[in-house]
Amino acid sequence: DLPPQRKTIFTLCKLEQMSYKEVSQLLGISTATVNSQIVKATSSIQKKLLASRHVAGCITLLLLLR
């Protein structure tokens, strides 16, 4: 449910384990934008998982954020 750019940034940083600097250079955006998009994506994902009370999803999120 994330907007396309936010989803891309989240995927690159959290799943592909790229640094904020690498993502900012790849996408032509500032590292501050990368950071704010990660914060917004994480918040959105947490809210959705907590609303559904899906324990496996919460565990997955915690593993992604470590």
Image (tube, rainbow, N blue to C red):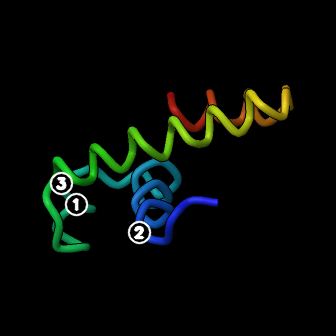
Q: Is residue 59 above or below residue 26?
A: above
Q: Residue at x 43, y 60 (%)?
A: 6
Q: For mark 3, give the secondary structure.
A: helix
Q: Say which of marks 2 and 1 sits in front.
A: 2
Q: Are marks 3 and 1 in contact (CB under 8 Å)?
A: yes
Q: How many marks?
A: 3
Q: Amino acid at mark 2?
A: Gln
Q: Are marks 3 and 2 in contact (CB under 8 Å)?
A: no
54, 60: nearer the viewer: 54
Q: For mark 1, give the secondary structure.
A: helix
Q: Residue at x 47, y 58 (%)?
A: 16
Q: Which residue is mark 3?
A: 21
Label 2, residues with CA under 10 Å away: few <14, some 14-19, many ≥20: few
Q: Position of residue 58 (x, y in %)?
A: 73, 29
Q: Which residue is mark 2?
A: 5
Figure quadrant of residue 54? top right
Q: Which residue is mark 1?
A: 22
Q: Is residue 62 left or right of residue 12?
A: right
Q: Position of residue 46 (x, y in %)?
A: 62, 33
Q: Residue at x 35, y 50 (%)?
A: 37
Name the N-terminal-most of marks 3 and 2.
2
Q: Position of residue 48 (x, y in %)?
A: 70, 39
* Cα–Cα span, label 2 and label 1: 15 Å
Q: For mark 2, give the secondary structure.
A: helix
